[in-house]
Amino acid sequence: MSPNPHLQLSDPELWDKARSGDLRAFGVLYDRLWEPLYETAWWRLRDEDAAKDIVQETFIHCWQQRATLLIRESPGAYFRSAVRRRVLNHLQSAAVREKYTRLSGESLPVLSHDASEKVAARELESHYRAQLAQLPEAMREVFTDSRELGLSVAEIAEKRRLSPQTVKNQLSGALKKMRKGLGQWLKIFF
């Protein structure tokens, strides 16, 4: 197969050929611009799939509208600008969905996790329970009241007939021991 003569053309020259329907020229432009455009989207979203979708949608839109798009200077700059606009639209629509979900008091359905996430969650739970069991009984009870039952310091003090300062000291000690005992697990998950 002979080398593609389009590879020698500049981006504006490729765009001019693409505007007149040259799919090979558009393909070369796509190959040149895809990765930097993906990186632009990914750095803003930190979501691989969404970044890929946005870049693909941008190329599709530009191909479909090629006859009316006047890009004279830099197709790369135009495409980057188009990707940024789509990223902003994506972020705004995600924020709007979250806002209305929060206002409606309804939550979105929980998505299922893959097997590795389930195994990791079980391992974390197991390590957490093992560390909890190693706490002195009074400290464990105060910690459980606070973290698992959601009781305030005042409520725990009343329930356990302790001073609020004793409850705070017990919680502080428990948190230090739990952090130390869970070590790397906290770094991974928190």
Image: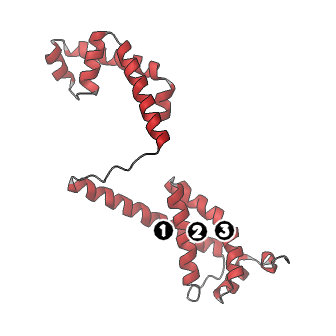
The N terminus - image quarter:
bottom right
Relative image position of residue 44 (x, y in whole percent): 51, 56
The C terminus - image quarter:
top left
Residue shown at 67%/84% (left/top)?
Answer: 18
For marks 3 and 1, give the CA distance: 16 Å
Horizontal arrangement in the rendering, residue 12 relative to residue 58 (left or right): right
Local SS, label 3: helix
Relative image position of residue 66 (x, y in whole percent): 59, 85
Front-lying residue, 147 or 43: 147
Residue 171, above or below 118 = above
Residue 62, above or below 46 = below
Local SS, label 2: helix
Three-letter residue code for mark 1: Arg
Indicate which label's residue lies in the foreground, 2 or 3. Answer: 3
Name the residue tied to disc 1.
86
Instruction: Find residue 33 and name its label.
Output: 3
For marks 2 and 1, give the CA distance: 10 Å
Instruction: Find residue 80 and name its label.
Output: 2
Q: Are marks 2 and 1 in contact (CB under 8 Å)?
A: no
Three-letter residue code for mark 3: Leu
Dot placed on the residue nearer the N-terminal end, 2 or 3: 3
Residue 130, above or below 66 = above
